[in-house]
Image (tube, rainbow, N blue to C red):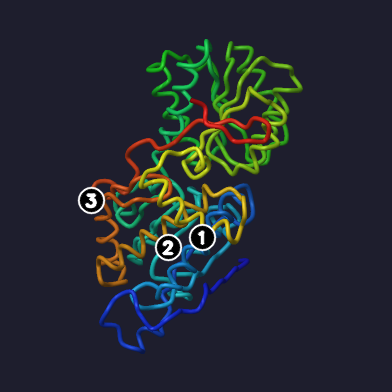
Amino acid sequence: MYQFRWISGLLLGGTVALSGMSDARAQDAYKIGMSAGLTGYAATVDRAWRDGVEVAIAALNAEGGIDGRKVELVVEDNRSEPQDAVTAYRKMISSDKVRVFASGCVSAGNFAAAPLVARAETPMVLCSILPQQPDQVKWAFTTIPPPRFEVETRLEYIQKRTQIRKIGVLHDPSPYANAQKAAAEKEAKDYGLEIVGVEQYKTDDADLSVQIQKMYAAGARAIIKIGLGGTTLTAAKNIKQLDLDMIMLTSLEDIAVFRPVAEVLGDKFFFVASPSQVYDGLEDSPLKTEIGKFLKPWRAKYKDRDPNWAGRGWDAVMLIAAAARKAKSVEGPNMRDALESMDNFQGTTGLYHMSATNHQGITENPLLLATITGGQIKVVK
């Protein structure tokens, strides 16, 4: 297992985040573990998530850390594969003694390791959908909005801004993509739309023309593309090469992935955007203020690199820190209970409303539809 280990900046100053800590305890590092797809299909997203977590940890350590301890991040590359994620989690629990997880967006990997994490009573704040079993959800929290929000943002645009009424759904086999697909199948009719084709692809497919042609032949003039990575550009090239009169609307992704897609499809390409990706176009609000707090250190280090997934990593760390302050403890069960009480917590993606019955957090759709025109990201009004 490839291991990346980073210890964020040294503890600055003598003031600790919480009072009552002994000098000896203040010397102990508080370990946050991360299982992330640093290689494989999720690499673009999970590397950004990791970098956002690092920036957040550096900011916390500069202010005294968590619970009076400096924070150490232990990262294991799961290669975007579930079996590697299980190995990564097991190692971090048994060998590295991590106290909480801020893991990446490989849902299948987080699902596979969830029983292990629950037995260890270690909270997880994730960049993926939640596990399916109640005893596992008990220890898991997510920074992402419900998958249906991504779907609804696109369906609403097709309904209100186009004459298209027949659509196709093109998705990868990941749990998150399947959740979006299910939402599209359930809700399309509510928007006056008919799904005439649902096609799956593999994350390493180099050609999607067969699936696209089938949907087009069935009458689809818009494709809801669900999934990460290079297949988005592959689909765009196939539509262009086949000279099809179709628009493509894609899921949340790093802007770097979208720029070449926009060059291929032009005004036939749209994507779901988070608020941080269109920060300059936002009105003044608590949301914009929080994004600004994150963007200052992010841009100082990474310039104009896409902030979306990194912002969610920032949110994960800030949720963990807030829970530790509230619980006055970093022990697993106490942290879990405190995370469950994080209501009205302002993040970079939206307002979190955690509760005993809701570990999803974001309950109001903060997502926007955007396009790239002349190299500039623009919100579709």
Secondary structure state at the residue bearing disc 1: strand
**Which circle's residue, 2 or 3, is located before the other in the chain?**
2
- Relative placement, left or right, of 150 versus 81 is left
Q: Against 36, is 65 above or below?
A: below
Question: How dense is the environment of label 3, judged by Cα within 10 Å: few (below 14), some, or many (20 and up)?
Answer: few
Q: What residue is at 52 percent from the left and 72 percent from the top?
A: 8
The residue type indicated by label 3 comes to: Ala
**Which circle's residue, 2 or 1, is located before the other in the chain?**
1
The picture places residue 270, in percent across and down from the top left corner, at 58, 28
**Which circle's residue, 3 or 1, is located before the other in the chain?**
1
Secondary structure state at the residue bearing disc 3: loop
Q: Nearer the viewer, residue 64 or 312?
A: 64
Q: What residue is at 57 percent from the left and 56 percent from the top?
A: 299
The picture places residue 203, in percent across and down from the top left corner, at 63, 40
Secondary structure state at the residue bearing disc 2: strand
Q: Which residue is mark 3?
A: 356
Q: Mark 2 and mark 1: span between their CA atoms? A: 8 Å
Q: Nearer the viewer, residue 66 or 186?
A: 66
Image quarter for residue 5?
Answer: bottom right
CB under 8 Å between discs 2 and 1: yes
- Numbered tag placed on residue 35 in the rendering: 1
Q: Against 191, is 5 above or below?
A: below
Q: Nearer the viewer, residue 381 or 335?
A: 381
The N terminus - image quarter: bottom right
- Residue furthest to the bottom in view is 24
The picture places residue 177, in percent across and down from the top left corner, at 50, 37
Q: Which residue is mark 2?
A: 101
- Relative placement, left or right, of 68 versus 230 is left
Q: What residue is at 51 percent from the left and 63 percent from the top?
A: 55
The residue type indicated by label 2 comes to: Phe
- Residue furthest to the right in view is 241
The residue type indicated by label 1 comes to: Ser
